[in-house]
Amino acid sequence: MHVLVAGGAGYIGSVLVPVLLEHGHKVTVLDRLYFGNSHTKLAAELGPQRLRVVRGDIRSFDPKILEGVEAVIDVAGISNDPSCELEPDLTRSVNVDGGKRLAKLAWEAGVRRYVYSSSCSVYGHGEGLGLTETSGRHPVSLYARAKAEIEDYLLELQKAPRASGPFEGVMLRLATVFGLSPRMRFDLAINVMTKNAYVNRRIMVDGGGRQWRPFVHVRDVAEAFALALLADAKVVAGQIFNVGSNTNNVQILNLAFRVRDAVPGTEVVHAPTDPDLRDYNVSFERVRRELDYTTKRTIDDGVREVLQAIKDGQVDPDDRRWYTLKQYVFLREAERAMADLGVDGRLLTAS
Ligand SMILES: NC(=O)c1ccc[n+]([C@@H]2O[C@H](COP(=O)([O-])OP(=O)(O)OC[C@H]3O[C@@H](n4cnc5c(N)ncnc54)[C@H](O)[C@@H]3O)[C@@H](O)[C@H]2O)c1
């Protein structure tokens, strides 16, 4: 199958694209490459018949790149709460307008399967334990509200009659992801706690630590997307699935203790912050029952692998690009400098 992966050079995309290639798919990546291009080597090895990377924006790309595409996976966008708060108008333009544009153009181009990376954060301040896909959504951030808006949009598109045949939108509400990726993220709870334990021998816990959060390994997420691409339309079209595992619902303070135990000499400290409004404990029964999906990696596996990669120098914990907010702040400042001081698109280099 020819699959277009929007955001395919991000944290999830960088692990997902090789998995799709392993499954025999042809892949086109559409990405702004804000965090670099993790696929340069693979694309050169495989050639454009198997893997093509297009630097482009979901808000403005040429719809021609959808020609021949049979499925789209949308993992593009501004991907955490603080980065979304940085410039709310930009967030709405990318995560809402861009997300809708991509889906609409895919719909118009006759793309059949469309898999969207929603988030368990749509539950926000969840009521009770074991939230299911039919539980109420209570998003508490701009980021999560944008996710809910795209879910609603895809459900509308799903209903619209189309001459080229059915449109099969699938929404995966991902738990918070952890584990190693070529585009690393040290702003995700397990990864950042592991990094801080190793580098500072100290883990900060925000918001009291009693709040629940579900977690899932990045490779397990990639497998979920691969499954959603091929699953029976009768089971997945127009459907929402929480992606993760019941056993990986953890209270943040307990998570900190688990990471602390992996790095001797680490202390856990409460940060003097407001309560974390995000508090959700999620059921992953539906995806197990209907798609026969189970995760294979534990939280401890993730902590071990991230720790080892830092120790081995395989990943540099000081690289700005691995901190989503820092990288977006840097890009915003670079853009301002270019606007203030640039001549013919240059700042310093001789023309
Ligand atoms: N990582 C998680 O814990 C998690 C959990 C739930 C949902 N999600 C969702 O999964 C998706 C991927 O997350 P991630 O962790 O890989 O984030 P990421 O920030 O690493 O990846 C997002 C990618 O989108 C690209 N991008 C940003 N704006 C773009 C635009 N206008 N046009 C084209 N590309 C653009 C970036 O360059 C980046 O490569 C996001 O939508 C995120 O909200 C992630």
Image (cartoon, rainbow, N blue to C red):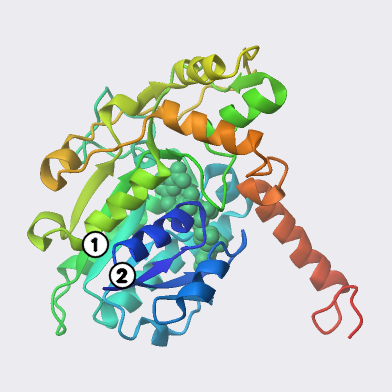
Position of the N terminus, as image quadrant, is bottom left
Residue at the limit of the structure toward the left, as seen here? 234
Is residue 78 at all visible to an observer of this figure? no
The answer to the question of whether label 2 and label 1 lie on touching residues, with beta carbons closer than 8 A, is yes
Secondary element at image label 1: helix
When the figure is inspected, residue 310 is found, relative to residue 149, above or below; the finding is above
Position of the C terminus, as image quadrant, is bottom right
When the figure is inspected, residue 163 is found, relative to residue 284, above or below; the finding is below
Name the amino acid type tagged 1: Leu
Is residue 207 at all visible to an observer of this figure? yes
Q: Residue at x 61, y 48 (%)?
A: 324
When the figure is inspected, residue 178 is found, relative to residue 125, above or below; the finding is below
Q: Tag on residue 151? A: none
Q: Residue at x 62, y 21 (%)?
A: 204
When the figure is inspected, residue 273 is found, relative to residue 73, above or below; the finding is above
Q: From the top left corner, tell me how far across and down residue 28 is, in percent.
A: 41, 74
**Residue with the mark numbered 2:** 25
Q: CA distance from mark 2 to mark 1?
A: 10 Å
Q: From the top left corner, tell me how far across and down residue 136 is, in percent.
A: 25, 37
**Residue with the mark numbered 1:** 229
Q: From the top left corner, tell me how far across and down residue 39 is, in percent.
A: 53, 65
Q: From the top left corner, tell me how far across and down residue 333 is, in percent.
A: 77, 59
Q: Residue at x 23, y 56 (%)?
A: 228
Earlier residue among tags 2 and 1:
2
The residue lying toward the viewer, choosing from 28 and 310, is 310
In the figure, is residue 334 to the left or right of 291? right
Q: Residue at x 46, y 61 (%)?
A: 76
Name the amino acid type tagged 2: His
